[in-house]
Image: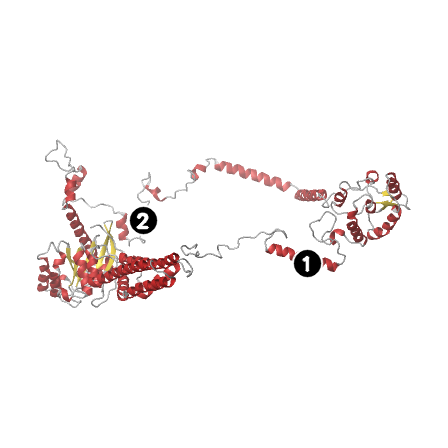
Amino acid sequence: MTTQLYNFKEITVVPNAKELIDIILSKTQRKTPTVVHPNYQISRIRTFYMQKVKFCQQSYHEKLSDILKEFPRLDDIHPFYADLCNVLYDRDHYKLALGQVAAVRNIIDNIAKDYVRLLKYADSAYKCKMLKRAGLGRMCTAVKKLQASLTYLEEVRQHLSRLPSINPSTRTLILSGYPNVGKSSFMNQVTNAGVQVEPYAFTTKSLFVGHFDYQYSRWQVIDTPGILDRPLDQRNRIEMSAITALAHIQASILYFIDVSEQCGWNIQAQVALFHSIKPLFKNKPVMVVCNKIDVKPIESLSEEDKMAIESMREGGDGVEFLATSCLKSEGVDQAKNRACDLLLKKRVEKKIETNKVGAIESRLHIAIPKNVRAGRQAFIPESVLQQRAVAPSGQLPEREWKTEKELQEEAGGAGVYNVDLNKRFLLENEEWRYDNVPEIFEGKNIADFIDPDINLKIRELEKEEATLLQEADNMDWDDVEWKETQRILDEIHGKIRLHRMEKGDKPKGHTARVARKKGATASEVEAHLGRFGYETEGVTARAARRRAPLSRAQPQGDAQMGTDESEPVLGKRKRGRDEDEDMTGGEAGAGPAGAAFGPVDVDMQDVWRNPKRARSDAISNKEQAAGLDPKKSQDKNPHKGRGVDRVNLGLAKEKDKKKALKGKLRTDKKLKQTRKKGEADRFIGNKMPKHLYSGKRGIGKTDWR
């Protein structure tokens, strides 16, 4: 049989009857369509209810099949586990419970088949609904009858999950004997299982498993509960679990005897138990372990007890005896190693007896060299023969020196003894062994940097230093310090001058200042316009009216006086960044008048400029006359730089401007909230996003989630 390690912890939880019904009906309601109307076609109504009946039957079938599949079949698993389940759970009860589950599964399949057939011939929605209700009800009634079986199977599952993982086919040691003879103490000595040990009988009530390594292989130790000497039919469940392990696992048996008789049974009774269960030890290596020799040594036993122990050899297949003391760890490792060796030998012999080994041996060929002397003996070196001749008993003489391991044990063990690594160095002079070795760096040590003439060079350096010190005494240190201070000051002043020059080269404003040309006088403008046929009436009067307020508002204004103080010079007013270029389309003062006279007053530009812009220029002139900066009085608007405040255009009062600004902000806020590009944006996004409207489809066959 192949090696198989059963894992009963993977069996899923078995629900009781009520929980199983709730699970299946809830699943049927969730996974099938839920909406049907009487005005649907009768074929659609039949399909709706038939789908519910079939789905419910399929869900019951899958759930019950999983239960039957996960629980082990006693006829298919190892005989050890089959008999252990029989001892712990009663084979008949176990198979009966699984059989009832299988029977109910078949009943549910037949019920679904019958009601699907009836639904095919239903002629109304009411009949379909009643047939569906009756079919699901009969299925649930059949499941209710499984209450006792499902409860029992859940208890079996819980107990199976707590069983130790025992591999019946691996290398194993089984500890057996009366209760309280030291089996658990021995197991704690050879493994890390940590089994509970108490001074009363039947402390161990089930099988416990521990593991250890021997000869690079993994071994398991099974600690069995104590066995009493009585008929098989009178033994309880605890004792039968030990009998099962002894009967079905091919292992090395360690039978423990308490020679101190502190367990409550004398040696005669313990020997009698060995003879009663001796048939279970057939074809297995057996070792009798006389435990607790620290309390009562073997030599102190009576002759009757010794003869009783010796009688255990009779009829046995090479029974061996070993004395141990788990309290003082005497003989424990020897017993373990001997038991392992016996089992390995037995397993090898068993494999050799098979036909497979014979087939391999027939293909083997043992090569024997030719011309071999008949009396060929082993070669022994001459030095070894001389040493044996000197030794009185023919043995090699003892070494004159001791190994470091021996010295360590004599000096107190590891951690106390300090190994001397230098005492056996092979050097020209033995006194050099403990000299400090210079540090090696990049293949060199300090000797590579030593100069043989270093003393001469040191004396020359000292003479040179003395000469320099003598010259330094003759120097005027005050003059040297003053020159050094002056040099530092010159460097600082040079950096300051350089910084000022760099700062002066930087531009003072955002734009470069351009020299302004002298403006034309009113009479010159009037004469020039007259030559082109323009109306020039009132030009001088308007220039005089403009002169007084501009001079008061701007003491350094743009209106300049010519050589003739009675006649004003028409200069340029202050403008925005590119106001004149936008308004006139070119250089400041361009036009019929500007061609000859350069800059022209803004009032004069009204003559040849677009009249639609006159109002905005008039507003700017009023603000200029009042001493206000037109650029600061304008609100932030998209038409900046064009010279026209289109946001507040036509609004005379400050209250109206604020009201208009609030309305604009309200409109902008609404556009931002709706994510629109503007007032004309009519885009409508996704009205049903998946993350908000996800769920079953109308017919209920699939679920988007």
The crowding category of the residue bearing disc 2, from other C-alpha atoms within 10 Å (few below 14, some 14 to 19, many at least 20), is few
Say left or right for 408 vs 380.
Answer: right
Q: Based on the displayed image, in which of its 4 quarters is residue 197 positioned?
A: bottom left
Q: Is residue 59 above or below residue 517?
A: below
- State the residue position of label 1: 662
The residue shown at (18%, 38%) is 383
Nearest the eye: 518 or 469:
518
Residue type beneath disc 2: Val
> Can residue 86 be seen here?
yes
Decide: marks 2, 1 in contact (CB < 8 A)? no
Residue type beneath disc 1: Lys
Q: Based on the displayed image, in which of its 4 quarters is residue 300 positioned?
A: bottom left
Furthest residue toward front: 123
User: Residue 289, how many percent across, how many down?
Assistant: 16, 59
Q: Secondary structure at mark 1?
A: helix
The crowding category of the residue bearing disc 1, from other C-alpha atoms within 10 Å (few below 14, some 14 to 19, many at least 20), is few
Q: Secondary structure at mark 2?
A: loop
- Mark 2 vs mark 1: in front: 1
Say left or right for 344 vs 193.
Answer: left
Say left or right for 695 vs 675.
Answer: left
Nearest the eye: 99 or 493:
99
- State the residue position of label 2: 419
Nearest the eye: 514 or 307:
514
Say left or right for 369 vs 197.
Answer: left
Q: Mark 2 or mark 1: which comes first in sequence?
A: 2
> Can residue 23 be seen here?
no
